[in-house]
Image: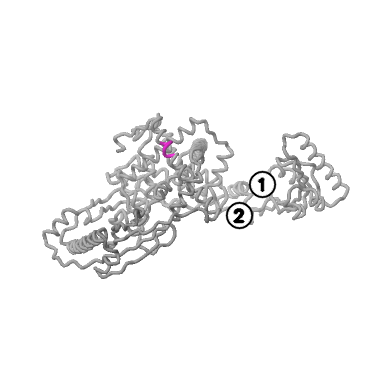
Amino acid sequence: MLQAIRDKAHGIFAWVMLLFVGVPFGLWGINNYFDGGKEKPVAVVGDHDIFEREVNRAYEGLVSRMGSSDYDEKQLRHEALEQVINIELITQSAHREGLTVSDDEIRSYVQTQPFFQTDGKFDKDRLKNVLSSQGMTPQQFTSQVASQLLSEQFVRGVTDTAIVTKRQLDNFYRFRNQERLVEYLTVPLKKADKEITDQEIEAFYQANKSQYQNPEKVSVEYISLSIDDVSGDFKPSDDDLKVLYEEQKAQFGSPEQRKVSHILITAGDTGNEAEVKAALTKAEGLRERLNKGEDFAKLAKENSDDKDSPLKNGEVVLYTKETIHPELANTAFALAKGEVSQPVKTSFGYDLVKVIDIVPATTKPFEEVRAELEKSYRRNAAENKFYEAKQKLDEMSFEHNDGLEPLAKNLGIKIAQTGLFTRDAGEGIVTEPSLRAAAFATDVLEGKNSPALEVGSDKVYVFHLKEHQPTSDKPLAEVKAQIVAKLQSKQAEDGAKKLAEQLIADVKQGKSLADAAKSIGVNVNKATVKLAGKTDVPPALMKAVNKAPRPRGGKPSPLLASMENGEQVVFVLTEVKDGSAASVDPKELEMAKDYLSKNAGQAEFNAYLDYLRDQMGVKITEQAN
Protein backbone atom coordinates (compact mmCIF):
# COMPACT_ATOMS: atom_id res chain seq x y z
CA MET A 1 0.00 0.00 0.00
CA LEU A 2 2.68 2.46 0.97
CA GLN A 3 4.63 1.81 -2.21
CA ALA A 4 1.53 2.61 -4.23
CA ILE A 5 1.24 5.85 -2.29
CA ARG A 6 4.88 6.64 -2.95
CA ASP A 7 4.48 5.94 -6.65
CA LYS A 8 1.65 8.43 -6.90
CA ALA A 9 2.86 11.05 -4.44
CA HIS A 10 4.73 13.19 -6.89
CA GLY A 11 1.87 13.45 -9.33
CA ILE A 12 -0.44 15.94 -7.65
CA PHE A 13 2.45 18.14 -6.61
CA ALA A 14 3.77 18.05 -10.17
CA TRP A 15 0.44 19.29 -11.50
CA VAL A 16 0.15 22.03 -8.90
CA MET A 17 3.72 23.18 -9.57
CA LEU A 18 3.08 23.08 -13.30
CA LEU A 19 0.10 25.37 -12.91
CA PHE A 20 1.84 27.76 -10.52
CA VAL A 21 4.62 28.30 -13.05
CA GLY A 22 1.99 28.88 -15.69
CA VAL A 23 3.12 32.38 -16.60
CA PRO A 24 6.63 31.40 -17.67
CA PHE A 25 5.09 28.49 -19.58
CA GLY A 26 2.77 30.95 -21.25
CA LEU A 27 5.56 33.37 -22.06
CA TRP A 28 7.16 30.88 -24.41
CA GLY A 29 4.05 29.08 -25.49
CA ILE A 30 1.80 31.93 -26.47
CA ASN A 31 3.66 32.79 -29.66
CA ASN A 32 2.45 29.50 -31.07
CA TYR A 33 -1.13 30.69 -30.67
CA PHE A 34 -0.56 33.88 -32.62
CA ASP A 35 1.98 33.08 -35.30
CA GLY A 36 1.05 31.95 -38.75
CA GLY A 37 1.05 28.25 -37.86
CA LYS A 38 2.42 26.96 -41.17
CA GLU A 39 4.32 24.08 -39.58
CA LYS A 40 2.65 20.71 -39.22
CA PRO A 41 1.30 19.85 -35.77
CA VAL A 42 2.84 17.01 -33.80
CA ALA A 43 -0.43 16.39 -31.97
CA VAL A 44 -4.07 17.47 -32.08
CA VAL A 45 -6.24 17.81 -28.98
CA GLY A 46 -9.86 18.20 -30.01
CA ASP A 47 -9.55 20.86 -32.70
CA HIS A 48 -6.38 22.47 -31.31
CA ASP A 49 -2.98 21.87 -32.94
CA ILE A 50 0.18 21.38 -30.88
CA PHE A 51 3.47 22.22 -32.59
CA GLU A 52 7.02 20.93 -32.22
CA ARG A 53 8.26 24.22 -30.77
CA GLU A 54 5.85 23.93 -27.84
CA VAL A 55 7.11 20.42 -27.10
CA ASN A 56 10.75 21.50 -27.48
CA ARG A 57 10.30 24.23 -24.88
CA ALA A 58 8.63 21.82 -22.48
CA TYR A 59 11.48 19.37 -23.08
CA GLU A 60 14.10 22.05 -22.36
CA GLY A 61 12.29 22.88 -19.15
CA LEU A 62 12.35 19.24 -18.04
CA VAL A 63 16.05 18.91 -18.89
CA SER A 64 16.86 22.09 -17.00
CA ARG A 65 15.10 20.82 -13.87
CA MET A 66 16.94 17.48 -14.11
CA GLY A 67 20.33 19.19 -14.17
CA SER A 68 23.13 16.75 -14.97
CA SER A 69 21.14 13.62 -14.13
CA ASP A 70 21.12 10.76 -16.61
CA TYR A 71 17.99 10.59 -18.71
CA ASP A 72 16.59 8.91 -21.81
CA GLU A 73 16.10 11.67 -24.41
CA LYS A 74 13.33 9.82 -26.24
CA GLN A 75 11.44 9.14 -23.02
CA LEU A 76 11.87 12.72 -21.82
CA ARG A 77 10.57 14.08 -25.13
CA HIS A 78 7.56 11.81 -24.78
CA GLU A 79 6.95 13.18 -21.28
CA ALA A 80 7.23 16.75 -22.64
CA LEU A 81 4.63 15.99 -25.32
CA GLU A 82 2.31 14.42 -22.75
CA GLN A 83 2.75 17.48 -20.52
CA VAL A 84 1.68 19.85 -23.30
CA ILE A 85 -1.26 17.61 -24.26
CA ASN A 86 -2.49 17.41 -20.67
CA ILE A 87 -2.32 21.18 -20.27
CA GLU A 88 -4.42 21.60 -23.41
CA LEU A 89 -6.96 19.03 -22.15
CA ILE A 90 -7.26 20.95 -18.88
CA THR A 91 -7.55 24.33 -20.61
CA GLN A 92 -10.29 23.21 -22.98
CA SER A 93 -12.20 21.46 -20.19
CA ALA A 94 -12.02 24.53 -17.93
CA HIS A 95 -13.56 26.67 -20.66
CA ARG A 96 -16.19 24.03 -21.41
CA GLU A 97 -17.21 23.96 -17.72
CA GLY A 98 -17.73 27.72 -17.78
CA LEU A 99 -15.02 28.53 -15.21
CA THR A 100 -14.12 32.21 -15.01
CA VAL A 101 -11.36 34.35 -13.54
CA SER A 102 -11.88 37.96 -12.46
CA ASP A 103 -9.63 40.87 -13.43
CA ASP A 104 -8.70 41.28 -9.75
CA GLU A 105 -7.51 37.66 -9.56
CA ILE A 106 -5.38 38.12 -12.69
CA ARG A 107 -3.93 41.39 -11.39
CA SER A 108 -3.14 39.91 -7.97
CA TYR A 109 -1.45 36.86 -9.51
CA VAL A 110 0.73 38.89 -11.89
CA GLN A 111 1.82 41.36 -9.22
CA THR A 112 3.03 38.56 -6.93
CA GLN A 113 5.27 36.89 -9.55
CA PRO A 114 9.00 37.46 -8.76
CA PHE A 115 10.00 37.96 -12.40
CA PHE A 116 7.73 41.03 -12.55
CA GLN A 117 9.17 42.57 -9.39
CA THR A 118 12.08 44.82 -8.53
CA ASP A 119 13.37 44.72 -4.96
CA GLY A 120 10.34 42.68 -3.95
CA LYS A 121 7.79 45.13 -5.40
CA PHE A 122 5.71 44.90 -8.55
CA ASP A 123 7.41 46.81 -11.39
CA LYS A 124 5.20 47.84 -14.32
CA ASP A 125 8.24 48.66 -16.45
CA ARG A 126 9.68 45.21 -15.90
CA LEU A 127 6.40 43.64 -16.97
CA LYS A 128 6.41 45.77 -20.13
CA ASN A 129 9.99 44.74 -20.88
CA VAL A 130 9.23 41.04 -20.49
CA LEU A 131 6.16 41.27 -22.70
CA SER A 132 8.10 43.24 -25.28
CA SER A 133 10.87 40.65 -25.32
CA GLN A 134 8.29 37.95 -26.06
CA GLY A 135 6.51 39.97 -28.73
CA MET A 136 3.29 39.87 -26.70
CA THR A 137 0.57 42.45 -26.22
CA PRO A 138 -0.91 43.01 -22.74
CA GLN A 139 -4.18 41.56 -24.04
CA GLN A 140 -2.47 38.35 -25.17
CA PHE A 141 -0.63 38.08 -21.88
CA THR A 142 -3.79 38.66 -19.83
CA SER A 143 -5.57 35.98 -21.84
CA GLN A 144 -2.76 33.51 -21.17
CA VAL A 145 -2.69 34.23 -17.42
CA ALA A 146 -6.47 33.82 -17.26
CA SER A 147 -6.10 30.47 -19.02
CA GLN A 148 -3.52 29.29 -16.48
CA LEU A 149 -5.65 30.36 -13.51
CA LEU A 150 -8.67 28.66 -15.04
CA SER A 151 -6.60 25.49 -15.33
CA GLU A 152 -5.68 25.74 -11.66
CA GLN A 153 -9.37 26.07 -10.76
CA PHE A 154 -10.15 23.02 -12.86
CA VAL A 155 -7.43 20.84 -11.31
CA ARG A 156 -8.39 21.78 -7.76
CA GLY A 157 -12.04 21.16 -8.57
CA VAL A 158 -11.13 17.51 -9.07
CA THR A 159 -8.30 16.94 -6.60
CA ASP A 160 -9.83 18.79 -3.64
CA THR A 161 -12.87 16.50 -3.56
CA ALA A 162 -10.95 13.41 -2.43
CA ILE A 163 -12.06 11.95 0.91
CA VAL A 164 -10.03 9.78 3.32
CA THR A 165 -11.99 7.53 5.69
CA LYS A 166 -10.99 6.54 9.22
CA ARG A 167 -10.51 2.97 8.03
CA GLN A 168 -8.07 4.11 5.34
CA LEU A 169 -6.14 6.13 7.92
CA ASP A 170 -6.05 3.17 10.32
CA ASN A 171 -4.79 0.89 7.55
CA PHE A 172 -2.11 3.41 6.67
CA TYR A 173 -0.74 3.43 10.24
CA ARG A 174 -1.22 -0.31 10.62
CA PHE A 175 1.35 -0.74 7.90
CA ARG A 176 3.47 2.38 8.47
CA ASN A 177 4.07 1.62 12.18
CA GLN A 178 4.41 -2.11 11.65
CA GLU A 179 7.38 -3.95 13.23
CA ARG A 180 8.85 -7.14 11.79
CA LEU A 181 11.12 -9.35 13.88
CA VAL A 182 13.73 -11.16 11.85
CA GLU A 183 16.68 -13.52 12.35
CA TYR A 184 19.33 -13.68 9.68
CA LEU A 185 22.82 -14.84 8.73
CA THR A 186 25.14 -13.44 6.09
CA VAL A 187 26.95 -15.67 3.62
CA PRO A 188 30.25 -13.86 2.94
CA LEU A 189 31.94 -13.65 -0.44
CA LYS A 190 34.97 -15.83 -1.04
CA LYS A 191 37.64 -14.92 -3.53
CA ALA A 192 37.11 -16.78 -6.80
CA ASP A 193 39.88 -19.26 -7.54
CA LYS A 194 38.85 -20.21 -11.06
CA GLU A 195 40.97 -18.71 -13.81
CA ILE A 196 39.17 -16.40 -16.25
CA THR A 197 39.91 -17.49 -19.81
CA ASP A 198 40.34 -15.24 -22.85
CA GLN A 199 37.27 -16.87 -24.39
CA GLU A 200 35.15 -15.88 -21.38
CA ILE A 201 36.49 -12.34 -21.50
CA GLU A 202 35.76 -12.03 -25.23
CA ALA A 203 32.25 -13.47 -24.82
CA PHE A 204 31.43 -11.09 -22.00
CA TYR A 205 32.82 -8.13 -23.96
CA GLN A 206 30.73 -8.95 -27.03
CA ALA A 207 27.58 -9.42 -24.97
CA ASN A 208 28.03 -6.23 -22.96
CA LYS A 209 29.63 -3.72 -25.31
CA SER A 210 27.09 -1.09 -24.34
CA GLN A 211 28.64 -1.00 -20.86
CA TYR A 212 32.07 -0.14 -22.28
CA GLN A 213 31.58 2.84 -24.54
CA ASN A 214 33.03 6.27 -25.01
CA PRO A 215 30.21 8.73 -24.35
CA GLU A 216 28.66 10.81 -27.11
CA LYS A 217 30.40 14.16 -27.47
CA VAL A 218 29.80 17.39 -29.33
CA SER A 219 31.48 20.73 -29.75
CA VAL A 220 29.61 23.82 -30.91
CA GLU A 221 30.23 27.19 -32.42
CA TYR A 222 28.28 29.91 -30.71
CA ILE A 223 27.54 33.58 -30.57
CA SER A 224 26.49 35.31 -27.39
CA LEU A 225 24.89 38.53 -26.30
CA SER A 226 24.91 40.00 -22.83
CA ILE A 227 23.14 43.02 -21.48
CA ASP A 228 26.54 44.72 -21.16
CA ASP A 229 27.19 44.19 -24.89
CA VAL A 230 24.20 46.27 -25.91
CA SER A 231 23.76 48.64 -23.00
CA GLY A 232 25.82 51.51 -24.41
CA ASP A 233 26.14 54.81 -22.58
CA PHE A 234 22.61 55.98 -21.92
CA LYS A 235 22.49 59.62 -20.81
CA PRO A 236 18.98 60.60 -19.79
CA SER A 237 17.90 64.23 -19.87
CA ASP A 238 16.42 66.03 -16.87
CA ASP A 239 13.00 65.69 -18.48
CA ASP A 240 13.46 61.91 -18.81
CA LEU A 241 14.43 61.63 -15.17
CA LYS A 242 11.58 63.83 -13.98
CA VAL A 243 9.07 61.68 -15.86
CA LEU A 244 10.60 58.59 -14.23
CA TYR A 245 10.54 60.37 -10.86
CA GLU A 246 6.81 61.02 -11.15
CA GLU A 247 6.18 57.41 -12.16
CA GLN A 248 8.18 56.02 -9.25
CA LYS A 249 7.51 58.70 -6.66
CA ALA A 250 5.86 56.21 -4.33
CA GLN A 251 9.19 54.33 -4.06
CA PHE A 252 11.01 57.42 -2.78
CA GLY A 253 9.12 57.93 0.43
CA SER A 254 6.43 56.56 2.69
CA PRO A 255 2.66 57.02 2.43
CA GLU A 256 0.57 58.70 5.07
CA GLN A 257 0.01 56.52 8.13
CA ARG A 258 -2.63 56.72 10.81
CA LYS A 259 -2.96 55.25 14.25
CA VAL A 260 -6.62 54.57 14.94
CA SER A 261 -8.90 53.18 17.62
CA HIS A 262 -12.26 51.62 17.02
CA ILE A 263 -15.33 50.34 18.81
CA LEU A 264 -17.12 47.49 17.07
CA ILE A 265 -20.81 46.78 17.64
CA THR A 266 -21.64 43.52 15.90
CA ALA A 267 -24.98 43.23 14.12
CA GLY A 268 -25.44 39.47 14.35
CA ASP A 269 -27.25 38.13 11.31
CA THR A 270 -27.09 41.02 8.87
CA GLY A 271 -30.34 39.78 7.36
CA ASN A 272 -32.15 40.51 10.65
CA GLU A 273 -33.26 44.13 10.35
CA ALA A 274 -34.09 44.42 14.06
CA GLU A 275 -30.56 43.39 15.13
CA VAL A 276 -28.96 45.68 12.54
CA LYS A 277 -31.06 48.60 13.73
CA ALA A 278 -30.25 47.85 17.37
CA ALA A 279 -26.50 47.81 16.61
CA LEU A 280 -26.76 51.16 14.79
CA THR A 281 -28.74 52.68 17.66
CA LYS A 282 -26.11 51.52 20.17
CA ALA A 283 -23.26 52.87 18.02
CA GLU A 284 -24.99 56.25 17.68
CA GLY A 285 -25.55 56.37 21.45
CA LEU A 286 -21.88 55.70 22.11
CA ARG A 287 -20.89 58.46 19.69
CA GLU A 288 -23.10 60.93 21.56
CA ARG A 289 -21.40 59.96 24.82
CA LEU A 290 -18.00 60.49 23.19
CA ASN A 291 -19.09 63.92 21.95
CA LYS A 292 -19.99 64.80 25.55
CA GLY A 293 -16.41 64.03 26.61
CA GLU A 294 -16.42 60.41 27.78
CA ASP A 295 -13.15 58.52 27.38
CA PHE A 296 -12.89 56.51 24.13
CA ALA A 297 -10.62 53.83 25.63
CA LYS A 298 -13.01 53.30 28.56
CA LEU A 299 -16.04 52.96 26.26
CA ALA A 300 -14.11 50.60 23.98
CA LYS A 301 -13.23 48.37 26.89
CA GLU A 302 -16.84 48.28 28.14
CA ASN A 303 -18.70 48.06 24.83
CA SER A 304 -16.56 46.89 21.88
CA ASP A 305 -17.39 43.44 20.53
CA ASP A 306 -13.84 43.23 19.14
CA LYS A 307 -12.38 41.26 22.05
CA ASP A 308 -8.84 42.32 21.17
CA SER A 309 -9.59 46.02 21.41
CA PRO A 310 -10.21 46.22 25.18
CA LEU A 311 -6.77 44.72 25.74
CA LYS A 312 -5.23 47.58 23.76
CA ASN A 313 -7.73 50.26 24.78
CA GLY A 314 -9.10 50.17 21.27
CA GLU A 315 -5.79 51.17 19.68
CA VAL A 316 -4.16 49.48 16.73
CA VAL A 317 -0.78 49.86 15.08
CA LEU A 318 0.04 52.39 12.40
CA TYR A 319 -1.67 51.67 9.10
CA THR A 320 -1.39 52.92 5.56
CA LYS A 321 -4.61 53.27 3.57
CA GLU A 322 -3.76 50.07 1.68
CA THR A 323 -3.25 47.96 4.81
CA ILE A 324 -6.24 48.97 6.94
CA HIS A 325 -9.50 47.08 6.52
CA PRO A 326 -10.97 48.24 3.16
CA GLU A 327 -14.38 49.04 4.67
CA LEU A 328 -12.76 51.44 7.17
CA ALA A 329 -9.97 52.87 5.03
CA ASN A 330 -11.80 55.81 3.46
CA THR A 331 -13.36 56.80 6.77
CA ALA A 332 -10.16 56.56 8.81
CA PHE A 333 -8.17 58.60 6.29
CA ALA A 334 -10.82 61.34 6.00
CA LEU A 335 -10.85 62.18 9.72
CA ALA A 336 -8.78 64.84 11.46
CA LYS A 337 -6.58 63.92 14.41
CA GLY A 338 -8.76 63.25 17.47
CA GLU A 339 -11.97 63.16 15.44
CA VAL A 340 -14.51 60.34 15.84
CA SER A 341 -16.42 59.01 12.83
CA GLN A 342 -20.12 58.45 12.36
CA PRO A 343 -21.04 54.74 12.70
CA VAL A 344 -19.50 52.91 9.72
CA LYS A 345 -21.36 49.88 8.34
CA THR A 346 -19.09 46.88 7.73
CA SER A 347 -19.64 43.18 7.19
CA PHE A 348 -19.23 42.73 10.98
CA GLY A 349 -21.64 45.40 12.16
CA TYR A 350 -21.01 49.07 12.95
CA ASP A 351 -17.67 50.68 13.80
CA LEU A 352 -16.81 53.95 15.49
CA VAL A 353 -13.34 55.06 14.39
CA LYS A 354 -11.13 57.60 16.12
CA VAL A 355 -7.83 58.89 14.72
CA ILE A 356 -5.21 58.91 17.49
CA ASP A 357 -2.26 60.14 15.46
CA ILE A 358 -1.32 61.05 11.87
CA VAL A 359 2.10 60.52 10.32
CA PRO A 360 2.20 62.57 7.11
CA ALA A 361 3.39 61.11 3.84
CA THR A 362 7.01 61.84 2.95
CA THR A 363 8.71 62.00 -0.43
CA LYS A 364 12.41 62.52 -1.09
CA PRO A 365 13.06 65.50 -3.40
CA PHE A 366 14.12 64.92 -7.01
CA GLU A 367 17.72 66.04 -6.52
CA GLU A 368 18.21 63.70 -3.59
CA VAL A 369 17.29 60.63 -5.67
CA ARG A 370 18.68 61.81 -9.00
CA ALA A 371 21.59 59.33 -8.96
CA GLU A 372 19.21 56.46 -8.19
CA LEU A 373 16.90 57.59 -11.00
CA GLU A 374 19.79 57.68 -13.49
CA LYS A 375 20.78 54.16 -12.47
CA SER A 376 17.20 52.95 -12.86
CA TYR A 377 16.83 54.69 -16.22
CA ARG A 378 20.05 53.18 -17.57
CA ARG A 379 19.06 49.73 -16.32
CA ASN A 380 15.62 49.96 -17.93
CA ALA A 381 17.06 51.27 -21.19
CA ALA A 382 19.70 48.54 -21.25
CA GLU A 383 17.10 45.85 -20.55
CA ASN A 384 14.85 47.16 -23.32
CA LYS A 385 17.70 47.18 -25.80
CA PHE A 386 18.85 43.74 -24.68
CA TYR A 387 15.36 42.29 -25.07
CA GLU A 388 15.09 43.78 -28.56
CA ALA A 389 18.49 42.37 -29.54
CA LYS A 390 17.60 38.98 -28.07
CA GLN A 391 14.33 38.87 -30.01
CA LYS A 392 16.13 39.83 -33.22
CA LEU A 393 18.74 37.13 -32.57
CA ASP A 394 16.04 34.51 -32.05
CA GLU A 395 14.27 35.50 -35.27
CA MET A 396 17.48 35.50 -37.30
CA SER A 397 18.51 32.12 -35.87
CA PHE A 398 15.24 30.67 -37.13
CA GLU A 399 15.40 32.40 -40.54
CA HIS A 400 19.10 31.54 -41.18
CA ASN A 401 19.30 28.24 -39.35
CA ASP A 402 22.15 26.64 -41.31
CA GLY A 403 24.98 28.64 -39.76
CA LEU A 404 25.99 31.53 -37.53
CA GLU A 405 27.80 33.73 -40.07
CA PRO A 406 24.74 35.78 -41.12
CA LEU A 407 23.85 36.42 -37.47
CA ALA A 408 27.38 37.35 -36.47
CA LYS A 409 27.77 39.70 -39.44
CA ASN A 410 24.41 41.40 -38.97
CA LEU A 411 24.85 41.96 -35.24
CA GLY A 412 28.60 42.55 -35.25
CA ILE A 413 29.28 39.59 -32.97
CA LYS A 414 32.28 37.26 -33.07
CA ILE A 415 31.77 33.50 -33.39
CA ALA A 416 33.37 31.46 -30.59
CA GLN A 417 33.57 27.72 -30.05
CA THR A 418 33.71 25.13 -27.29
CA GLY A 419 35.80 22.03 -26.90
CA LEU A 420 34.20 18.59 -26.98
CA PHE A 421 31.82 17.88 -24.11
CA THR A 422 29.31 15.21 -23.07
CA ARG A 423 25.73 15.42 -21.93
CA ASP A 424 26.92 15.23 -18.33
CA ALA A 425 29.95 17.51 -18.21
CA GLY A 426 31.69 20.30 -20.03
CA GLU A 427 34.01 23.24 -19.53
CA GLY A 428 33.53 26.95 -20.02
CA ILE A 429 30.01 28.03 -20.90
CA VAL A 430 28.79 24.42 -21.09
CA THR A 431 29.23 23.86 -17.39
CA GLU A 432 25.63 25.14 -17.49
CA PRO A 433 23.36 22.03 -17.77
CA SER A 434 20.68 23.77 -19.86
CA LEU A 435 23.24 24.74 -22.50
CA ARG A 436 24.59 21.19 -22.70
CA ALA A 437 21.06 19.87 -23.12
CA ALA A 438 20.41 22.40 -25.91
CA ALA A 439 23.58 21.33 -27.72
CA PHE A 440 22.34 17.72 -27.84
CA ALA A 441 18.86 18.67 -29.08
CA THR A 442 17.82 16.92 -32.28
CA ASP A 443 17.71 20.09 -34.41
CA VAL A 444 21.25 21.08 -33.41
CA LEU A 445 22.61 17.58 -34.06
CA GLU A 446 20.98 17.76 -37.50
CA GLY A 447 22.95 20.92 -38.32
CA LYS A 448 20.41 23.62 -37.51
CA ASN A 449 20.92 26.62 -35.27
CA SER A 450 19.55 26.43 -31.78
CA PRO A 451 16.95 28.96 -30.67
CA ALA A 452 18.20 31.83 -28.52
CA LEU A 453 19.21 30.20 -25.23
CA GLU A 454 18.86 32.33 -22.11
CA VAL A 455 21.16 31.94 -19.13
CA GLY A 456 19.92 34.01 -16.25
CA SER A 457 18.33 37.30 -17.27
CA ASP A 458 21.33 38.95 -18.89
CA LYS A 459 22.94 36.45 -21.28
CA VAL A 460 21.76 34.68 -24.44
CA TYR A 461 23.47 32.18 -26.77
CA VAL A 462 22.85 30.61 -30.17
CA PHE A 463 24.57 27.29 -30.94
CA HIS A 464 25.55 25.58 -34.18
CA LEU A 465 27.12 22.13 -34.32
CA LYS A 466 30.88 22.06 -34.94
CA GLU A 467 31.67 18.37 -34.33
CA HIS A 468 29.65 15.36 -33.28
CA GLN A 469 31.25 12.17 -31.98
CA PRO A 470 28.62 9.43 -31.49
CA THR A 471 29.09 6.85 -28.80
CA SER A 472 31.79 4.33 -29.70
CA ASP A 473 32.96 1.01 -28.31
CA LYS A 474 36.10 1.03 -26.22
CA PRO A 475 38.66 -1.54 -27.42
CA LEU A 476 38.82 -4.81 -25.50
CA ALA A 477 42.43 -4.20 -24.44
CA GLU A 478 41.36 -0.99 -22.69
CA VAL A 479 38.62 -2.64 -20.62
CA LYS A 480 40.03 -6.17 -20.16
CA ALA A 481 41.06 -5.60 -16.54
CA GLN A 482 37.57 -4.30 -15.69
CA ILE A 483 35.96 -7.35 -17.29
CA VAL A 484 38.22 -9.75 -15.43
CA ALA A 485 37.33 -8.05 -12.13
CA LYS A 486 33.64 -8.21 -12.98
CA LEU A 487 33.77 -11.91 -13.89
CA GLN A 488 35.70 -12.74 -10.70
CA SER A 489 33.13 -10.80 -8.68
CA LYS A 490 30.32 -12.72 -10.37
CA GLN A 491 32.05 -16.02 -9.57
CA ALA A 492 32.20 -15.03 -5.91
CA GLU A 493 28.53 -13.96 -5.91
CA ASP A 494 27.43 -17.16 -7.63
CA GLY A 495 29.36 -19.21 -5.04
CA ALA A 496 27.75 -17.32 -2.14
CA LYS A 497 24.28 -17.71 -3.68
CA LYS A 498 24.76 -21.44 -4.21
CA LEU A 499 25.81 -21.89 -0.58
CA ALA A 500 22.89 -19.72 0.66
CA GLU A 501 20.40 -21.81 -1.33
CA GLN A 502 21.84 -24.98 0.25
CA LEU A 503 21.41 -23.45 3.74
CA ILE A 504 17.79 -22.58 2.95
CA ALA A 505 17.16 -26.16 1.87
CA ASP A 506 18.72 -27.42 5.15
CA VAL A 507 16.51 -25.14 7.28
CA LYS A 508 13.40 -26.20 5.39
CA GLN A 509 14.30 -29.83 6.19
CA GLY A 510 14.39 -29.07 9.94
CA LYS A 511 17.83 -27.64 10.63
CA SER A 512 17.78 -24.53 12.83
CA LEU A 513 19.07 -21.24 11.47
CA ALA A 514 21.63 -21.20 14.30
CA ASP A 515 23.01 -24.60 13.22
CA ALA A 516 23.09 -23.44 9.61
CA ALA A 517 25.11 -20.41 10.69
CA LYS A 518 27.60 -22.57 12.61
CA SER A 519 28.16 -24.77 9.57
CA ILE A 520 29.70 -21.83 7.70
CA GLY A 521 31.25 -20.11 10.73
CA VAL A 522 29.00 -17.07 11.02
CA ASN A 523 26.61 -15.77 13.68
CA VAL A 524 22.83 -15.35 13.62
CA ASN A 525 21.69 -11.77 14.03
CA LYS A 526 18.33 -10.53 15.28
CA ALA A 527 16.69 -7.26 14.30
CA THR A 528 13.40 -5.40 14.32
CA VAL A 529 12.62 -3.99 10.90
CA LYS A 530 10.47 -0.85 10.86
CA LEU A 531 9.03 0.79 7.82
CA ALA A 532 9.19 4.21 9.48
CA GLY A 533 12.19 5.18 11.54
CA LYS A 534 15.76 3.96 11.76
CA THR A 535 16.46 0.25 11.23
CA ASP A 536 19.93 -1.25 11.60
CA VAL A 537 19.76 -3.62 8.65
CA PRO A 538 20.94 -3.13 5.06
CA PRO A 539 18.33 -1.55 2.72
CA ALA A 540 18.17 -4.66 0.53
CA LEU A 541 17.40 -6.85 3.54
CA MET A 542 14.81 -4.39 4.84
CA LYS A 543 13.05 -4.43 1.45
CA ALA A 544 13.04 -8.24 1.34
CA VAL A 545 11.77 -8.52 4.93
CA ASN A 546 8.93 -6.07 4.27
CA LYS A 547 7.88 -8.06 1.19
CA ALA A 548 8.05 -11.42 3.00
CA PRO A 549 4.73 -13.16 3.84
CA ARG A 550 3.68 -13.36 7.48
CA PRO A 551 4.86 -16.51 9.33
CA ARG A 552 2.23 -19.26 9.31
CA GLY A 553 1.77 -22.42 11.38
CA GLY A 554 4.81 -21.88 13.61
CA LYS A 555 7.19 -23.17 10.95
CA PRO A 556 10.16 -21.04 9.90
CA SER A 557 10.15 -20.04 6.24
CA PRO A 558 13.71 -19.13 5.27
CA LEU A 559 14.13 -16.64 2.44
CA LEU A 560 17.04 -15.15 0.50
CA ALA A 561 18.06 -11.52 0.04
CA SER A 562 20.91 -10.38 -2.20
CA MET A 563 22.95 -7.44 -0.91
CA GLU A 564 24.37 -4.68 -3.10
CA ASN A 565 27.93 -5.90 -2.48
CA GLY A 566 27.03 -9.41 -3.68
CA GLU A 567 26.75 -11.02 -0.23
CA GLN A 568 23.74 -13.26 0.34
CA VAL A 569 21.53 -13.11 3.44
CA VAL A 570 19.38 -16.01 4.62
CA PHE A 571 16.61 -14.77 6.93
CA VAL A 572 13.55 -15.99 8.79
CA LEU A 573 10.64 -13.66 9.59
CA THR A 574 9.59 -14.74 13.09
CA GLU A 575 6.85 -12.23 14.03
CA VAL A 576 4.85 -9.30 12.63
CA LYS A 577 3.44 -6.64 14.99
CA ASP A 578 0.90 -4.37 13.29
CA GLY A 579 1.02 -0.66 13.97
CA SER A 580 -1.80 1.52 15.25
CA ALA A 581 -2.97 5.10 14.91
CA ALA A 582 -4.11 5.21 18.54
CA SER A 583 -0.98 6.81 19.95
CA VAL A 584 -0.23 9.09 17.00
CA ASP A 585 -0.20 12.83 17.68
CA PRO A 586 -3.41 14.49 16.37
CA LYS A 587 -1.39 16.98 14.32
CA GLU A 588 0.46 14.12 12.62
CA LEU A 589 -2.85 12.39 11.95
CA GLU A 590 -4.11 15.50 10.18
CA MET A 591 -0.93 15.66 8.10
CA ALA A 592 -1.27 12.00 7.18
CA LYS A 593 -4.91 12.50 6.27
CA ASP A 594 -3.95 15.44 4.07
CA TYR A 595 -1.17 13.35 2.49
CA LEU A 596 -3.51 10.48 1.69
CA SER A 597 -6.16 12.90 0.45
CA LYS A 598 -3.71 14.47 -1.99
CA ASN A 599 -2.76 11.08 -3.35
CA ALA A 600 -6.37 10.01 -3.67
CA GLY A 601 -7.02 13.28 -5.49
CA GLN A 602 -4.12 12.52 -7.80
CA ALA A 603 -5.55 9.12 -8.66
CA GLU A 604 -8.96 10.67 -9.40
CA PHE A 605 -7.35 13.39 -11.49
CA ASN A 606 -5.32 10.90 -13.55
CA ALA A 607 -8.46 8.86 -14.20
CA TYR A 608 -10.33 12.01 -15.25
CA LEU A 609 -7.52 12.97 -17.63
CA ASP A 610 -7.82 9.56 -19.26
CA TYR A 611 -11.56 10.16 -19.63
CA LEU A 612 -10.93 13.57 -21.22
CA ARG A 613 -8.51 12.06 -23.73
CA ASP A 614 -11.19 9.62 -24.84
CA GLN A 615 -13.91 12.27 -24.96
CA MET A 616 -12.00 15.01 -26.78
CA GLY A 617 -9.80 12.84 -28.91
CA VAL A 618 -6.01 13.11 -28.93
CA LYS A 619 -4.13 12.38 -32.12
CA ILE A 620 -0.33 12.12 -32.17
CA THR A 621 1.31 12.34 -35.59
CA GLU A 622 4.13 10.11 -36.78
CA GLN A 623 6.41 13.16 -36.62
CA ALA A 624 6.12 13.13 -32.83
CA ASN A 625 6.89 9.43 -32.43
Callout 2: SS: helix
The three-letter amino acid code for the residue at tag 1 is Glu
**Residue 610 place in picture, x, y as percent:** 40, 35
The three-letter amino acid code for the residue at tag 2 is Arg
Q: Which residues are magenta?
A: 605-609
Whether residue 556 is visible to the viewer of this picture, yes or no, is: yes
**Residue 326 place in picture, x, y as percent:** 68, 43
Res 270 → quadrant: top right
Magenta span dominant secondary structure: helix
Q: Nearer the viewer, residue 107 or 524?
A: 524
Q: Which residue is mark 1?
A: 322
Q: Residues within 10 Å of mark 2 (few under 14, many from 20)?
A: some
Q: Which residue is mark 2?
A: 370
Examine the structure image and report whether residue 440 is included in the region drawn in magenta. no
Tally of numbered tags: 2
In this picture the colour scheme is one colour
Res 539 → quadrant: bottom left
